[in-house]
Each structure stands twice: as structure tokens, then as C-alpha cells.
Image (cartoon, rainbow, N blue to C red):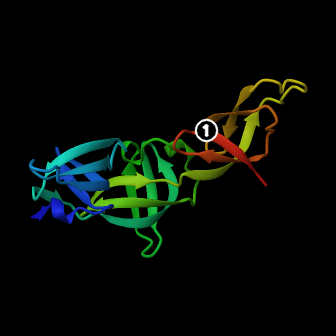
Amino acid sequence: MATTSDFRPGLTIRYNNDLWTIVEFQHVNPGNWRAFVRAKMKNIKTGQVIENRFRAGQDVDVVRIEQRAYQYLYRDGDMFVFMENDTFEQIQVPEEVVGEGSDLLKENETVQIFFNGTEITAVEIPIFVSLRVVETEPGLKGDSVNNVMKAAKLETGATVNVPLFVNEGDMLKIDTRTASYVERVK
């Protein structure tokens, strides 16, 4: 069993029956009070970040998380099929594990899958993806005074708001965390 003295950024622990990654920590010794460790932790499944205090030397349950690169192949109903790059082994991952941004995944995109033993704990998709616009209305000339946006359907079927100057066939850089337009790609 590990203790708070084993804390380091990137360490994964089980806390309140969830898996949390230590983002940063600080050992505090306030004079004649008991020492404690202040830790900022990120939930692996939800991405929620909290700050918590642990007694110095408190036992914690360290979990070994393995991270492997997989290639996204296709979607089968509510399951996503991925292939490991080295062994070509295919696995199916439920949509709720893939999480937000799953509608922005393009075939052959490389993702990171996190395993706790054989259990899939999370799927990390790239922060930015380049996608082609397949359908959008033409922008009106002279309507560029305001920050006016229009809807555009991307090659994956997702719809995002884009500036008026974006046309069909343009490649766009999309932020998968917010599903928002970043810039045009040449």
C-alpha cells in the first residue's frame, strides 16, 4: 500500500470508488499543526478536477493504468471499433466510454486508450482534428461586421458553428473538447 509520500504528477489513485490522476500536489507543514498534503486531482472518466487534502503519510490505493495507441476503424451501432497498432487486435468500446467528441472521430484517427488491467477506463481522442466541410450555406457578402456564425456539417456527420467565409470543401481545424471551430487548414 502506498502513502501520500509516493505522490507525483501522473500517479493514478482510487479515491471514493473512482480513478483519479494526481495533477499537482504540495506538502504543507503549518507550524504546530499536523502536516498534510494538498493535491489537485483529475477524474479519469469525467475529467472533473478537484482539490483534496490528505493527512501526511495516509495510505492511498495506487492503480496501475496502462496506455496504448489504437486506431479508430468504424462505428457499429453504439460501439466504436478500434485496432491496436502493433498487434492488429480489434476491440469494441461503448460510446459512453469514448465520451464527448466521439462524433468528431474520423476513420484511421489515432487515439489513446487507458486500461486498468483488462477494463477500459477511458479513451483520449486528439485535442484537434482536421475535418472537411460537406454541407453549409454560402456566406453573404458584406455581413462580416459582426461575429456571425453559421452551421456547417462535417465529414463525420457532426455539426459545428463556423464563420461566414467557410465554404463547402474547406478543411477545418476543430477543437474536440468544445466541438468548436479553430481555423481553416490549407
Q: Which residue is at 16% across, 59% downward?
A: 4
Q: Which residue is at 30% across, 42% downward?
A: 50
Viewer-nearest residue: 111 or 18: 18
Please, what is the three-letter code of the amino acid marked with disc 1? Ser
**For the residue labelled by badge 1, is the local secondary structure a helix, a strand or a loop?**
strand
Viewer-nearest residue: 185 or 153: 185
Left or right, residue 164 beside residue 101: right
Q: In which quarter of the image is the C terminus?
A: bottom right
Viewer-nearest residue: 76 or 180: 180
Quarter-of-image position of residue 166: top right
Give the percent coordinates (x, y) of residue 32. 9, 49
Give the percent coordinates (x, y) of residue 184. 75, 47
Q: Quadrant of the N terminus?
A: bottom left
Give the percent coordinates (x, y) of residue 48. 35, 41
Position of residue 142 relative to residue 181, above or below, is above
Determine which residue is flagged by label 1: 180
Left or right, residue 124 beside residue 158: left
Position of residue 101 relative to residue 85, above or below, is above
Viewer-nearest residue: 14 or 86: 14
Dot 1 crowding, Cα within 10 Å, few <14, some 14–19, many 20+:
some
Q: Which residue is at 42% across, 48% downward?
A: 98
Left or right, residue 114 beside residue 56: right
Q: Residue furthest front?
A: 31
